[in-house]
Amino acid sequence: MTLLEKILAAHSKFDSVTPGQIIDIEIDTRAARDFGGANVVKNLNDFGLSLNDPGKTLFTFDCNPTGSDQKYAVNQHICRLFARENGIKIYDIDAGIGTHLLIDEGYVIPGSTAVSTDSHANILGAVGAFGQGMGDMDIAAAWHEGKIWFKVPPSALINLTGDIPEYVSSKDIILNLLKIFGASSLLGYSIELSGKCLERMTLDDRMTISSMATEIGAIIILIPPSTEIIEYCRQKAGKDFIPVYADKDAAYEKTFNIDISGFVQMVSRPGEPHDAVEVTAVAGQKIDSAFVGSCTNGRMSDMRKTAAILKDRKVAPGVILKIVPATDRIWKECLNEGLIDIFKKAGALVSNAGCAGCAAGQVGQNGLGEVTISSGNRNFPGKQGKGSVYLASPEIVAASAVAGYITTADKIPAIPSTFSVKGKAKSTIGKGAVHKPEESRPFLLEGQIWVIQKDNIDTDMIFHNRYLAITDLKEMGQYTFNNLKGYEDFASKVQPGDFVIAGKNFGSGSSRQQAVDCFTSLGISGIIAESFGAIYERNAINAALPIIKCNSMNDLGVADGDNIRINLKTGEIKSLSNGKSIMAEPFSEVQYEIYMKGSLLG
């Protein structure tokens, strides 16, 4: 078995597992964040569910640790009250990013399993553990049952040969891999890395690479634990364990040999993390702001690299630099080592530990027309604000902040670039509750279609992160697709019973349940796509929203406004306009069972 298969088998009733098999897996650690936590609590309360093991259950408040938004403040208080009543540990607003704490506080060790409402929970692959971001229903089910259903993914092995070039960072490595594989060629795969260069990678390096598994479309990027990683985890967990590795005769569906010695410093252009180019292709691009932090690059080594560039320098006039350490422990180390002093003298804003810009709840957001270079992991339109976001390593971000334009540390000019600042900002917020499942549901569905010929429609396009505090299903529908260019008025035109047809990787990105529930709010009959983002697929199945995989919709010869009929049992899709029929992937037994129940928790 592969590394992931061995971990999943060890947490199931089976001695071995194979790709495509649907199993129940025991979850060692079950976490919820501040924006998803309130919905998890609502699910538990609404369905009268108890906790399986409070000692394995925790909250992490990392999306809005500043409490700067009233909706977040209310949600955090809901979680605090629930935690007090049930004896649950909270890593509150002073702690930092939850996925980092799971490793640093010893909850996760090589070979263990964990789930969180954070779509980047697969960062735990950095220590050879299984981590998965899931929606509110999944987490509620895991809290109640102590386990969750999971479909064993196929595995791909990427063997990295050669030596890492001197100026290439761990962020450059994952951006190079994103350029090679894109956002969907390994969609739904478990990626396992191998190669001698991995032995020299620190925990921080590994976390940077594994944290962007979601952006490459993978379930997880697993890195076999080194001696250093094993010792770190033993020390933090306060116990011994036997690390897990893939069998020597493990069967991988895909294998790649990539010479890492040819990797270069990279930057992802605005809109898509996988639109990565050599830094020279965008060098000289004027910036308004810069950000160092996130679960991808908020570790202590990132802070030290940033400080080394900023020491005895100033941020360029008119440029804003924001720095957010990943955890409070790292923040204190920065203070003790004098890094905070360096940051402040350079003119940077240093915030308390947390996710920052990615979560729309702290610092890091940008305004309309603003150009930002960020060490984060996502630059989807609207994800970190209404401006444009380039992704890069902390070294490139810091150098660019000093120069006033995108550059590298070895090319910082003696005199920075200057410019006039323009732009205005807007913000919107909302609120909510859960829906009740229907008593019975048809397996034959008919409706009019909306054809959206676009791949990689991410969750920010579907349901923007500025509405994440909304939990009332009735309020969600009006915001559907209002961040998808050309479909901003979709919610006002669509009719109950309609279908959405899209391309590959529909629903990529965040774990937010609202990106599914907004369609239910509008009465959409279902979504047909060539493939779906892994977390989105789970969320839709669990919410009983019909999603259908079909790669031959073009053969049906339909267009916007045509009517179709779908048989969920057989997978047959028939055009009621021209009489043609094609076959899609029918519902699995699990999907159909959940659909008929009305939801996973029904």
Image: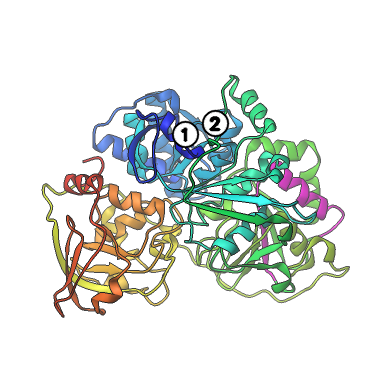
Which quarter of the rendered picture does the C terminus lie within?
A: top left
Query: Residue at left 24%, top 75%?
Result: 556
- Residue at the top extreme of this rendering: 239
Percent coordinates x, y for residue 499 in the rendering: 24, 67
What is the three-letter code of the residue carrying label 2? Val
Q: Which residues are magenta?
A: 287-314
Q: Does residue 416 appear anywhere in the picture?
A: yes
State the mark number for residue 244: 2
From what the image shows, is residue 239 above or below residue 143? above
Q: Does residue 469 appear anywhere in the picture?
A: no
Q: Residues within 10 Å of mark 1 (few under 14, many from 20)?
A: many
* Sequence-first tag of 2 and 1: 1
What is the three-letter code of the residue carrying label 1? Lys
Side of 223 where 227 appears, left or right: right
Q: Residues within 10 Å of mark 2 (few under 14, many from 20)?
A: many
Side of 57 where 262 appears, left or right: right
Percent coordinates x, y for residue 37 in the rendering: 41, 40
Secondary-structure class at tag 1:
helix
State the mark number for residue 6: 1
From what the image shows, is residue 461 above or below residue 297? below
Percent coordinates x, y for residue 215 in the rendering: 52, 57
Percent coordinates x, y for residue 66 in the rendering: 56, 45
